[in-house]
C-alpha cells in the first residue's frame, strides 16, 4: 500500500502545475525534428576513425562466428538415489524411504565447429556420461552427435555430427600464445539456453592456474560476460579466430561477476588432435616432483635471481633420473622456453609427445647446465596413486610442533613408507600452527636431508636442530609417499 501511495502522489504532483504551464512552448532540437533520410541502415554514412570502422568490427566478427557456434543438449540416465526426508512417516522410519526413481537428466552447453565434417570442440563437463547428444545450429536445425573422445584432466571433449551429408562452417583457429593482456575478445555461446549470445570484453590475464578447476590449467581470464551454458563456447579475437574455449566462471552468486576462464586454443588443439586420432590423450613425462622457488628456498640454495622451478625429487628410472637431473636443481628453461613456475613446466612437458628430445637448462649450485632428455609417456594410474595422506597420532610433540621417530618396520608399515626410503626421521605428529606446520610437514613424512646433509635417524635430526644457530633456516628434503620436496624450517 505504501508503494501505491508513492506512485499516486507522484502522478498527482505531475498533474498539479501552475496555470499557464501547459501553454508554454518548448523548443525541440532540430536533429530530433528531422526525419531520417536513409531507409536502410547500411545506406547511412559511417564515420571512419583513426583505427578504421571500429564500431563495425564486433558485428562483423559475430556475424562470421555464429554459423560455427552450436548449442549442445545432452541427456543421461541417472540412477535412483535414496531420498533424504526429515519429516518421514513412521512407515518410512521402520521400512526405509523408497527413494527417487531413475530419471533422465538434461544438460545444456555450447560447442565450436572446427572442421567442415561436423567435428565440434567443447568441454568434457558439458557431455560427460551423456548417452544422447543433440546439437542445434544457428539456423535452428538439429542433429544427433557422437563422442569422439574426452579428457577430464583438461576438461576438453570432441564430438561429431552423426551421418553428416553436408559441409559445415568451421571456425578458423588463432594463436593464443600471441594474446596480449588488454586485447579485445568476443565470447559466443548459449548462456541459460539463450543461443547465439554474443558478449565482449578484454583479456584480463593469461596463464591462470591453481584454481582447482582442472588438473592441467593455463587459463585465459576475461571479463567478457560468461554464464552457465557458455561452457564449451568460443572466445574469439577481433580477427574472428578461435583463441579459447570458455570453461568456467568465478562467482559468488552462480552468475557473471566479471571473471571468466577459457582454455587456450594452443592447449585444446594438441589435446583434441589426440582425442580424434586415439580417443585418449597421451602426455609427456619427465619424472620429477617440482615446487615453486620461494624466496626462503632460493636463499638457502644460493639461487640469486629466484627464477625457475625447483626439483624437489627425481623418480628412479625416470627420464630425468637417466639424464642426470638431481633434487635441488632449478629448471630454468626447456627448449629455450623460460619456466616461471611449476605450472609452466607441468603443462609444457605434458603437451610433448613421448619420445621427444628436450634441452633442459638447470641451475645447480650456481652453475648453468643443459641436459638432453628424452621424455616418455606419463602413467596416469601411477600418478593418481601418489596421493598425500593424513592420519591422527597422539605422539608427544616437541617445541618445534612435531614428533619424530626412527624409520622402523612399524613406522614403515603404519605410514606405508616405500622400501626405497632406507633412512631418515619419520614425522609422527604435527601441531596445527606450529613451526613444523608452517613448513608444510605432515605425519608420515620422512626427513631425509637437512642443509644438504643426510639424516640417518631421529636422533641425527635432533642433533642437527640443536646445532643450528638460533633464527637461521634449515633446508629440509622430505620424502612423502615416494616423492621428495624441499622446505625450510
Image: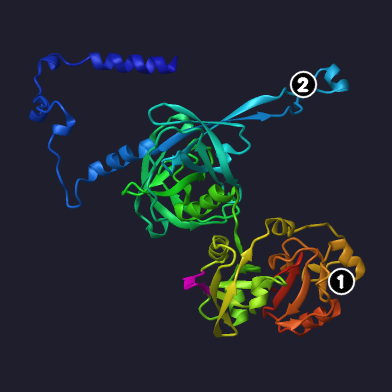
Query: Which of the pair 246/87 is nearer the observer?
Result: 246
Q: Which residues lie in the magenta part? A: 332-339
Q: Could you say where residue 479 lies in the image, as x and y percent from the top left?
A: 75, 70
Q: Residue at x 61, y 78 (%)?
A: 329
Q: Residues within 10 Å of mark 1 (few under 14, many from 20)?
A: some
Q: Residue at x 10, y 29 (%)?
A: 29
Q: Could you say where residue 157 lies in the image, as x and y percent from the top left?
A: 55, 44
- Position of 25 compared to 101: left or right? left
Q: For the stretch drawn in magenta, what is the main secondary structure?
A: strand
Query: Which of the pair 268/205 is nearer the observer?
Result: 268
The dot on residue 101 is none
Q: Quadrant of residue 360?
A: bottom right
- Position of 314 compared to 54: left or right? right
Q: Which residue is mark 1?
A: 405
Q: Which residue is mark 2?
A: 87
Disc 2 or 1, which lies upstream in sequence? 2
Does 479 appear above or below 78?
below
Does 468 appear above or below 234?
below
Does 24 appear above or below 439?
above
Q: Residue at x 77, y 76 (%)?
A: 448
Query: Which of the pair 426/247 is nearer the observer?
Result: 247
Amino acid at each position: 500500500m505504501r508503494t501505491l501511495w508513492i506512485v499516486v502522489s507522484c502522478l498527482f504532483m505531475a498533474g498539479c502545475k501552475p496555470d499557464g504551464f501547459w501553454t508554454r512552448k518548448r523548443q525541440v532540437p532540430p536533429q530530433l525534428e528531422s526525419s531520417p533520410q536513409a531507409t536502410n541502415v547500411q545506406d547511412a554514412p559511417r564515420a571512419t576513425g583513426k583505427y578504421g570502422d571500429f564500431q563495425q568490427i564486433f558485428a562483423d566478427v559475430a556475424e562470421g562466428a555464429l554459423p560455427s557456434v552450436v548449442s549442445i543438449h545432452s541427456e543421461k540416465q541417472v540412477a535412483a538415489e535414496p531420498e533424504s526426508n526429515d519429516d518421514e512417516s513412521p512407515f518410512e522410519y521402520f521400512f526405509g524411504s523408497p527413494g527417487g526413481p531413475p530419471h533422465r537428466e538434461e544438460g545444456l552447453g555450447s560447442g565450436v565447429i572446427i572442421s567442415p565434417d561436423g567435428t565440434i570442440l567443447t568441454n568434457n563437463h558439458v557431455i560427460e556420461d551423456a548417452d544422447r547428444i543433440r546439437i542445434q545450429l544457428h539456423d535452428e536445425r538439429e542433429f544427433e552427435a557422437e563422442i569422439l573422445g574426452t579428457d577430464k584432466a583438461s576438461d576438453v571433449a570432441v564430438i561429431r555430427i552423426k551421418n553428416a551429408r553436408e559441409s559445415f562452417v568451421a571456425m578458423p583457429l588463432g594463436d593464443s600464445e600471441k594474446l596480449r593482456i588488454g586485447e579485445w575478445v568476443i565470447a559466443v555461446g548459449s548462456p541459460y539456453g539463450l543461443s547465439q549470445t554474443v558478449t565482449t570484453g578484454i583479456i584480463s590475464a593469461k596463464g591462470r592456474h591453481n584454481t582447482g578447476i582442472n588438473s592441467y590449467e593455463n587459463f585465459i581470464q576475461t571479463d567478457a560476460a560468461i554464464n552457465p551454458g557458455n561452457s564449451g563456447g568460443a572466445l574469439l579475437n577481433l580477427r574472428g579466430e578461435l583463441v579459447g574455449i570458455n570453461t568456467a566462471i568465478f562467482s559468488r552468486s552462480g552468475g557473471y561477476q566479471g571473471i571468466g576462464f577459457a582454455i587456450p586454443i594452443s592447449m585444446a588443439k594438441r589435446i583434441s588432435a589426440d582425442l580424434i586420432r586415439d580417443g585418449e590423450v597421451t602426455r609427456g613425462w619427465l619424472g620429477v616432483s617440482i615446487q615453486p622457488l620461494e624466496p626462503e628456498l632460493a636463499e638457502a640454495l644460493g639461487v640469486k635471481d629466484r627464477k625457475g622451478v625447483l626439483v624437489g625429487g627425481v623418480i628412479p628410472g625416470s627420464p630425468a633420473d637417466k639424464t642426470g637431473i638431481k633434487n635441488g636443481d632449478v629448471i630454468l628453461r626447456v627448449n629455450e622456453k623460460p619456466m616461471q613456475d611449476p605450472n609452466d613446466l607441468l603443462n609444457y612437458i605434458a603437451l610433448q609427445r613421448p619420445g621427444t628430445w628436450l634441452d633442459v637448462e638447470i641451475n645447480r649450485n650456481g652453475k648453468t647446465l643443459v641436459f638432453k632428455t628424452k621424455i616418455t609417456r606419463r602413467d596416469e594410474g601411477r600418478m593418481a596413486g601418489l596421493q598425500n595422506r593424513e592420519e591422527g597420532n597422539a605422539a608427544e610433540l616437541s617445541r618445534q610442533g612435531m614428533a619424530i621417530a626412527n624409520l622402523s618396520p612399524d613406522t614403515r608399515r603404519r605410514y606405508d613408507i616405500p622400501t626405497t626410503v632406507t633412512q631418515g626421521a619419520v614425522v609422527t605428529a604435527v601441531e596445527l600452527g606450529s613451526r613444523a606446520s608452517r613448513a608444510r610437514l605432515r605425519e608420515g613424512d620422512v626427513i631425509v636431508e637437512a642443509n644438504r646433509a643426510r639424516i640417518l635417524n631421529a636422533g641425527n635430526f635432533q642433533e642437527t636442530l640443536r646445532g643450528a644457530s638460533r633464527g637461521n633456516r634449515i633446508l629440509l628434503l622430505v620424502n612423502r609417499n615416494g616423492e621428495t620436496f624441499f622446505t625450510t624450517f
